[in-house]
Every structure is written in C-alpha cells, then in structure tokens.
C-alpha cells in the first residue's frame, strides 16, 4: 500500500509538465484565434468575390477582389440610410450612457450615501429583464409619446442596455484612482472641478473610452429593439434582418461585412486606449 | 508669518467623536508633531487644518486669518500624503510645477522653482520620469519637493515616512529636518512613531482618544509626562508604574519602601519611574529578575516587583541571571507621581 502511494506520488519531471503546458497554451491560442479569425476571413473572402464565385464549388479560398457584391449592396435601396441610422443611434447611445453612467460611477466610488449597496444591485438588476419582455410595452409607450421610429427613441432603449456596464465599468475605474490624488490637487490650488479635469480625467480617459466603445458596440449589434421600435428609420441590423433573408447569398455576405468591419475599424482605431495603462504600455 | 490657532475644534463622525474640543497654538516656523496611536484623531486634526475635513465645531486660524470655512487652496498650505499622491500621468517636473501652474506663475519662475526644489531634494536627474518609474523613496522626495515649491506658509505632513523601509526612513528623517528648518515654514507633522516625533519636533502634541494630552518639547514630554498615558506611550521600554499609598508620616509606601511624595498628593497615588533611572543599591525596591536582554551598551532586565512587571535598564557589566533578587533604587529627582483617578501628573 505504502509502496503504491510512494510510486504514484513520485514527482514528474518539470520539463514534461512544461512541454504539456506549452502545448496546451499554444493549442488554446490557435483555437481562440481561429474562433475569431476564420469567420471574419470567410466573410471577407466571400464579400470580395463575384456572385458567381460565392456560389461556385470548389472554393479557392482567395478573394478575387470583385467589387460587384459591395457595389450592389451599397446601391441597394435604403442601405446607406440604415447605415447612417445605425451610426447615429450608436453615437447617441455612447454619449448618453457615458453622460449618465460616468457620474453615477463617480458618485458610487467617491461618496457614501444611504442605499448605495441597493443602488448597485438595482443597476445590475436592469439586465435581469429580457428585452423581448420590455420591447412591446416600450413600443406602445413610444407610440403614445411620439418617440417611435426615431433614432433618439431607439438610442434611449440602447442606453438602458448599456448603462449598467457604463456604471460598473466607470465605478471600478474611478475607484482605481486614489482619493489622495484629488485631495493633493485641492491643496495645490484646484477646486473640485479643476482637480477632476487635471488629475482624474486624464487618468480615467482610457477606461472611459473603452466603456464608450463598449456602449457603441452594444448599440451597433443590437437587433431586437431596433426591429420592434423602428419602421422607416431602420438601423442596419434591423434593415439587414428584414431584407437579407430574402436576398441572394453574396448580398448576405456583403451585409455581414458591412456590420462587422466598422466595428473592427473603430476598435482598432482606439485600441491604444484599451491597452494603455499608465507606466506599463502606451503603444 | 503663519501662526496657527486652533480654537475648540471638535469633530464627530455620526455618533463617534473623533476630536473633543481641541485648543492648540502653533508658533510661526515651529515644527509641531502630532503623536498618538492610530485612531487618536491626529490625522483628522491635520485634515481639518488642511481643509480636507470640516470641523463640527470650533475655529482654525492661519496667519491671522480664519480659514475653517475656506477650501484647501485658499489656506496657504501644502500637504504631503502618506502614500505620496504623486500624479501618475505627469512627469516629476510637471508634478512639482503643478501648484505653480495653478497659481499662473510665469514659466521662467516655474522653471526656477522646480529646479531649485528638485535640487534641494536631490531629484534633479529624475525630472523627466513618471511616478511609475520611481522608487518609494524617490516618490516621497517628489511629494516633498512639490509641497516646498509652493513656498507655503504651512506644510502639513501625514505620516510621510511610514511607507518607507527602516533605513530609508532614518535617512529621510534627517534630511527632512534640515530642509524644513531652512525653508522657514510652519510644519505640522503627524506620526505614530515616537522616535520620529522626538527627533524632529520642536514641540510634540501627544494625542489620545481625541484629546491633546500634552503639548511640550520632546525632552519635557519624556521627562515630565503630564499624564500616565504619555509616560506609558513614550519611551521604549516604557515607564514603570507601581501603586503608592500615603503612610502616617506623610511619605508614600511603594512596594515595601517609603519615598518622599508630592505635598499636594492624595491618599493613593501611582509611582512612576523610567527604566534607565534605576540603580542597584541597598534599600531599594525588591525585584525578582525574570528575563535578561543584553543590548550592548545596556542590559534590559524585566523583573517582578510586588507581582507587577517592572523593567530596568542597567549597566551591561552587571552580572544578573533569571531568578536573582535585585534591589532597585529610583533616582529621587526622576520619580514622577500620577493621580490614579484622573491619571494626571501630581507635583
């Protein structure tokens, strides 16, 4: 018995574990990259191929850079308007959710007030209600007050979706800034607003930007509320959901690319803020 | 000229009273240390003077101007924080220049002052760095330089050395003392470290439970503690205490020997003596040695007198072993007496 335990207990060579660990690590890396990149690649290839190539077989896997699908898609009735609506709604959502969420996050991190814990809980609870449950009452209400089928109306709904994240993300960002930094600024001649502008804001900007991008993408990707609440002023997601199910395959690829690529470009443009931490990396 | 007057300042947080009606005057250019254990209210008092906390009651005057309703920026103070609070998004240069830019000083003046204070704190080679690239000691220097560059009437320091390692603390302590003496500002310095307090202060305010128990020079605080708390808090090893009762002929009976006590004392007093004020001679307190700790220059003997813990710092030539009976004679002029009811000193 004791002999068996001793044998089983014999430590393995560290190099064996290291090799297995490295294999797992790289397998994980490859898998995760493939998970993200393969669909994007297929989307790109098919978007940049002529309609005939999309339906043809076997596949070459290399785009022929035929702009036919894209041209047709862009000239498709209503696409440009839907694209504009999407950008408008997403930008409005971004502004509203940061304008409302960031002060709430600041208050949560800096002040003690009764019901603080309950408030934090309630902010999260707003995510507990499925959107389909809320969408119809909201639609009815919006029709009554005339907010239906408007970008601002949809942006308000998207803002409620984005706010919990905006509050909690900015709360943790502000909590990461020691109060002493603000107090030091006050003793060095700043009033509360100046201290915020000169000390807190530069430090939280990367985090706020990341939070804003998050709000933007939540709105950009949202399709359910957009489909229910808009008729004439469809956003791109709602428009594509409606039109593309009856469109040929190459058009669907073009539409998919039109949804994915702006989001990718936007995140790429501000990636520095998402990685930047003071003193660590600023690429 | 910045004399600081604190008149009846009290502070409560809900039902907890952090400060009970504090009265204190700090002279121009004086180095005042607020000393006490954590939770005694010393940091609260400092923050009230700084304007980061508002008093529940009372007035604060700096340089003849009442400031307790003014924001920190209008009080002519600069503060050094325990965790340095060096702005991480600015270079050392911009950190030191921060307050000067808020004052809208011309660039030439800003540059002169930054360079001068950086030189004073020996950080002139670090001016282009960010706080993330500095060690704790260097950040501390930046924080002090930033305060000095303001050329304030009053510098407030909240345990500025407590995050540094022991050796660095010793070095910074000596340096701070020199720099602040030359700057001719009034300084209020909060610490829980009695050695730091003794070595830096012109005057020490010993605080306990939201009261200032004694405000006096370091030697006075050490030699003539105004209350039992001061005697037990300051000094390492701390003061010894023994109960004393007046006998028939007006002397006080302490653990079997009779000593001359204060004329104004009551029937019961507490006898107190510092461990280094004891000598071995006949007719003293009967002590049984328990633990012997040779410390080089001296030997610390922890003993029992009348069943109570009693420490003596004796000459290291003395041969003593645990269990030995000693006769410890207190130096008459170093004996202090406390009223056991009020815990105040009795003369």
Image: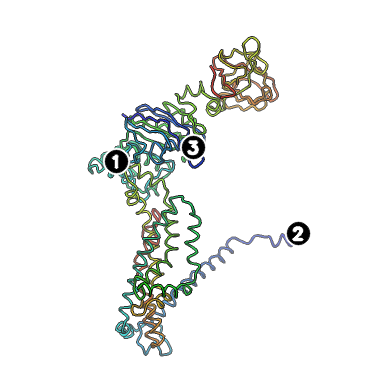
Q: Is residue A232 visible?
A: yes
- Above or below residue B336? Residue A269 is below
Helix, strand or loop under label 2: helix
User: Pointer 2: what residue?
Assistant: A2
- Asked where in the image residue B301 lies, by quadrant, the reply is top right
**Which residue in the protein does label 1 denote?**
B114
| Quadrant of the image occupied by residue B140 | top left
Query: Contact, CB < 8 Å: mark 3 with mark 1?
Result: no
- Residue designated by label 3: B18
Chain ID of residue with mark 1:
B
Numbered disc 2: what chain?
Answer: A
Residue A60 falls in which quadrant of the image? bottom left
A7 or B317, nearer to the observer: B317
Separation of disc 2 and disc 1 at Cα? 72 Å
State the quadrant of the C terminus of chain A. bottom left
Quarter holding the N terminus of chain A?
Answer: bottom right
Q: Number of callouts in the render?
A: 3
Label 1 packing within 10 angstroms: few (<14), some (14-19), many (20+)? many
Would you place residue A240 above or below residue A171 in this image? below
Q: Position of residue B42 (x, y in %)?
A: 46, 35
Of discs 2 and 1, which sits in the foreground?
A: 1
- Numbered disc 3: what chain? B
x and y, in percent, of residue A212 in the image: 38, 64
Label 3 CA crowd tier, 10 Å (few <14, some 14–19, many 20+): many
């Amino acid at each position: 018995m004791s002999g068996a335990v001793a044998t089983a207990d014999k430590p393995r060579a560290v190099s064996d574990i290291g090799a297995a660990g490295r294999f797992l690590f790289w397998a994980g890396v490859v898998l995760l990259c493939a998970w993200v990149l393969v669909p994007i690649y297929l989307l790109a290839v098919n978007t940049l191929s002529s309609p005939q190539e999309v339906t043809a077989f076997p596949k070459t896997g290399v785009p022929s850079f035929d702009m036919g699908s894209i041209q047709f898609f862009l000239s498709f009735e209503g696409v440009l308007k839907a694209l504009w609506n999407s950008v408008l709604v997403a930008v409005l959502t971004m502004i509203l959710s940061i304008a409302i969420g960031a002060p709430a996050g600041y208050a949560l991190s800096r002040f003690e007030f009764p019901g603080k814990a309950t408030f934090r809980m309630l902010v999260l609870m707003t995510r507990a209600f499925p959107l389909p449950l809320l969408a119809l009452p909201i639609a009815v209400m919006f029709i009554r007050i005339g907010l239906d089928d408007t970008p601002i109306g949809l942006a308000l709904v998207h803002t409620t979706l984005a706010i919990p994240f905006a509050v909690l993300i900015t709360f943790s960002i502000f909590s990461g800034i020691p109060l002493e930094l603000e107090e030091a600024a006050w003793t060095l001649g700043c009033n509360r607003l100046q201290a915020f502008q000169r000390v807190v804001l530069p430090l939280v900007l990367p985090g706020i930007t990341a939070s804003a991008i998050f709000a933007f993408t939540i709105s950009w990707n949202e399709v359910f509320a957009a489909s229910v609440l808009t008729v004439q002023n469809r956003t791109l997601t709602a428009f594509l959901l409606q039109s593309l199910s009856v469109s040929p395959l190459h058009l669907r690829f073009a539409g998919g690319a039109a949804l994915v690529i702006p989001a990718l470009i936007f995140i790429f443009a501000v990636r520095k803020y998402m990685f930047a931490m003071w003193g660590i990396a600023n690429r | 000229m910045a004399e600081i007057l604190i008149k009846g300042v009290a502070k409560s947080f809900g039902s907890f009273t952090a400060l009970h009606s504090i009265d204190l005057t700090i002279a121009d250019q004086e180095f005042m240390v607020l000393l006490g254990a954590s939770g005694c209210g010393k940091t609260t008092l400092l923050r009230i003077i700084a304007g980061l906390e508002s008093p529940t009651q009372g007035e604060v005057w700096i340089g003849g101007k009442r400031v307790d309703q003014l924001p920190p920026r209008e009080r002519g103070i600069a503060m050094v924080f325990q965790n340095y609070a060096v702005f991480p998004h600015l270079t050392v240069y911009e950190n030191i220049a921060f307050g000067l830019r808020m004052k809208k000083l011309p660039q030439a003046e800003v540059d002169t002052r930054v360079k001068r204070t950086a030189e004073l704190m020996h950080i002139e080679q670090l001016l282009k760095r960010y706080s993330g690239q500095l060690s704790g000691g260097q950040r501390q220097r930046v924080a002090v330089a930033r305060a000095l560059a303001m050329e304030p009437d009053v510098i407030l320091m909240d345990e500025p050395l407590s995050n540094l390692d022991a050796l660095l603390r010793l070095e910074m302590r000596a340096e701070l003392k020199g720099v602040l003496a030359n700057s001719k500002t009034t300084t209020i310095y909060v610490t829980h470290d009695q050695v730091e307090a003794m070595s830096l202060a012109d005057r020490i305010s010993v605080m306990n439970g939201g009261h200032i128990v004694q405000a006096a020079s370091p030697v006075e605080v050490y030699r003539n503690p105004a209350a039992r708390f001061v005697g037990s808090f300051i000094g390492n090893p701390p003061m010894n205490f023994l109960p004393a009762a007046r006998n028939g002929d007006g002397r006080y009976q302490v653990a079997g020997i009779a000593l001359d006590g204060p004329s104004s004392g009551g029937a019961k007093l507490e006898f107190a003596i510092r461990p280094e004020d004891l000598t071995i001679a006949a007719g003293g307190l009967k002590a049984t040695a328990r633990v012997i700790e040779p410390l080089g220059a001296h030997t610390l003997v922890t003993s029992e007198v009348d069943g109570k813990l009693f420490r003596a710092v004796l000459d290291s030539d003395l041969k003593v072993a645990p269990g030995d009976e000693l006769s410890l004679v207190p130096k008459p002029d170093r004996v202090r007496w406390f009223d056991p009811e009020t815990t105040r000193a009795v003369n």
